[in-house]
């Protein structure tokens, strides 16, 4: 695994350099504790420090998490890790619980990623310094620790929410690691919110262009399922047929987003958190990405204008694909209206007690419903057929909107669906599957953006060549070009589907 030199790591530690937060962890041999580089505790002697590229590697080496700097609250940069797409995808699946519970295994996880088990282990060792199992274990411990520390959730629920099979297992793990029962780690002052809500903070790596992200969501908010006001984003949530809602706010002084969830099933908490991370692009090492793109003199001024601009994600693959099809050839406002009608006609109603806001009335319709019902929307027949085809494909393959193989394979798989062309496939790959190198090159907004920065007229063929040096972060370059086009509000109508 590639870490900076021991000397560089130690300098980061001595200066409590926030740029290394989430990238390196230090295990202190004399205490057996591992810390974030920004830990307020006195800096240990150089000879006593071991440096790791992940919390799991530190925990694997026998260190336990510090109670002061709380490694569980370091920015989780999983989604860019080690420039290995496979590792990033595996981490995303693990964070949704792919290695929790009895029926799960590394074999299954590897199969979902389209590689062998040994190769998966080797990649994890190379990029994270720990095995997939250790990463999953560490994730459970750190997530549980965060829930204990920041909420009033009963311990049995913490154990379930974090993916421990049983309360006994949870208690044993915590006693082994911290030499005290989990309840001893609870802050006296933890959370005062309404009991049915769980409030968590998710850290990002600054800078973070919250305004642009919120503007993007505001322009596209579907009534009934989303609300975006001056400073917060709210939406309804369905996980495995269970309904609830969330509210996301920005906590700039803590370099975090605050997430309030009102959801009947605690076991779904990791899945909800994973989706919020995806939607708000919390895993990006944005400094590195901005630096890479700034090497292009044409992009540099755009990045200076919007430092920390994120690529918004999709909450759900099916929803994202349907929204993309509804938006073909029409304005964002018209697409939004259509989506709102679809939701009222076919989405289930959220029980009032699980609405954080009374207007959060429906969830997005399921593939099953869209496949079987008469859709009843005024739109061209070809596009109605495309909606049906997407719903049928999603029903047939529950992993349709998960990454599989290379980005080219992912895009080809989506293009197999009738009515999904190159633009839609690239767009869905970018938003829902989080292929950060996806690039809908025929997009009219992108072409205009490229023409504006380069002067003259841009063609898709030229732009594709032009974008080679932006790899593997073309999605972020696209976001900057869209932003330069008078912002995201009325762009992204494709010239071709
Ligand atoms: Zn510490």
Image: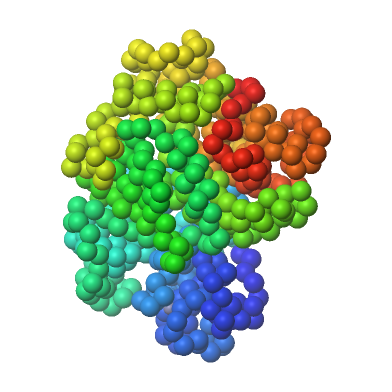
Please report the residue visible at 50 percent of the width from the left and 51 percent of the height from the top. Answer: 211
Q: Is residue 289 visible?
A: no
User: Residue 395 appears at what percent x and percent y?
Assistant: 40, 25
As drawn, the residue found furthest toward the right would be: 456
Residue at 54% of width from left, 62% of height from top? 206
Q: Is residue 388 left or right of residue 14?
A: left
Where's residue 91, x and y in %?
Answer: 48, 52
Instruction: Determine the quadrant in which ligand 1 lies.
Output: bottom left
> Residue 392 location in percent, x, y?
42, 20
Image quadrant occupied by the N terminus? bottom right
**56 or 217, nearer to the observer:** 217
Q: Is residue 255 visible?
A: yes
Check the picture and name the quadrant holding the C terminus.
top right
Q: Which residue is rendered at x = 18% and y = 56% of the image? A: 195
Q: How many marks?
A: 0
Q: Is residue 274 left or right of residue 427?
A: left
Tell me which corner region of the image, top left, top right, bottom left or bottom right, holds residue 466: top right
Q: Is residue 376 above or below residue 99?
A: above
- What residue is rendered at 53% in x and 57% in y? 208
Which quadrant of the structure image shows residue 50?
bottom right
Question: Looking at the image, is 70 positioned above or below residue 352?
Answer: below
**Front one among 180 and 161:** 161
* Quadrant in the rendering for residue 354: top left
Name the colouring of the figure: rainbow
Say which of 115 and 57 sits in front.
57
């Amino acid at each position: 695994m590639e870490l900076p030199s021991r000397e560089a790591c130690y300098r980061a530690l001595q200066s409590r350099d926030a740029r290394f937060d989430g990238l390196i962890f230090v295990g202190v041999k004399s205490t057996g504790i591992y810390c974030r580089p920004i830990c307020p505790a006195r800096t240990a002697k150089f000879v006593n420090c071991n440096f790791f590229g992940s919390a799991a590697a530190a925990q694997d080496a026998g260190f336990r998490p510090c109670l002061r700097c709380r490694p569980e609250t370091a920015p989780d940069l999983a989604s860019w890790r080690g420039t290995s797409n496979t590792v990033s995808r595996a981490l995303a699946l693990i964070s949704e619980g792919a290695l929790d519970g009895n029926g799960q295994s590394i074999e299954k996880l590897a199969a979902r990623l389209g590689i062998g088990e040994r190769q998966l282990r080797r990649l994890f060792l190379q990029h994270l310094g720990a095995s997939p199992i250790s990463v999953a274990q560490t994730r459970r411990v750190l997530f549980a620790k965060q829930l204990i520390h920041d909420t009033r959730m009963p311990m049995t629920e913490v154990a379930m929410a974090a993916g421990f099979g049983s309360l006994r297992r949870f208690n044993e793990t915590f006693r082994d690691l911290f030499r005290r029962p989990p309840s001893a780690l609870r802050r006296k002052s933890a959370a005062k919110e309404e009991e049915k809500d769980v409030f968590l903070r998710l850290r990002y790596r600054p800078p973070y262009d919250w305004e642009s992200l919120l503007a993007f969501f505001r322009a596209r908010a579907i009534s009934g399922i989303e609300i975006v006001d001056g400073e917060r984003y709210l939406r309804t949530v369905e996980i495995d047929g269970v309904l609830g809602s969330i509210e996301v706010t920005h906590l700039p002084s803590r370099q975090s987003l605050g997430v309030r969830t009102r959801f009947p099933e605690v076991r779904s908490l990791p899945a909800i958190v994973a989706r919020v991370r995806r939607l708000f692009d919390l895993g990006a090492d944005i400094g590195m990405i901005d630096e890479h793109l700034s090497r292009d003199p044409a992009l540099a001024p755009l990045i200076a204008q919007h430092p920390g601009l994120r690529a918004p994600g999709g909450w759900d693959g099916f929803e994202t694909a349907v929204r993309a099809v509804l938006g073909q050839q029409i304005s964002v406002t018209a697409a939004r209206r259509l989506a709102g009608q679809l939701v009222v006609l076919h989405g289930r109603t959220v029980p009032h007690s699980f609405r954080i806001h009374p207007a959060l009335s429906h969830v997005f319709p399921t593939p099953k419903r869209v496949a079987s019902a008469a859709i009843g929307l005024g739109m061209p027949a070809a596009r109605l057929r495309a909606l049906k085809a997407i719903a049928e494909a999603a029903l047939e393959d529950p992993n349709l909107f998960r990454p599989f193989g290379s980005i080219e394979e992912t895009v080809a798989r989506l293009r197999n669906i009738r009515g999904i062309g190159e633009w839609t496939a690239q767009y869905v790959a970018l938003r829902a599957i989080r292929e950060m190198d996806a690039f809908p090159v025929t997009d009219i907004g992108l072409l205009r953006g490229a023409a504006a920065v380069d002067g003259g007229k841009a063609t898709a063929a030229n732009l594709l060549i032009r974008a080679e040096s932006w790899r593997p972060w073309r999605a972020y370059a696209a976001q900057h070009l869209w932003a330069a086009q008078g912002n995201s509000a009325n762009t992204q109508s494709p010239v071709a589907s």
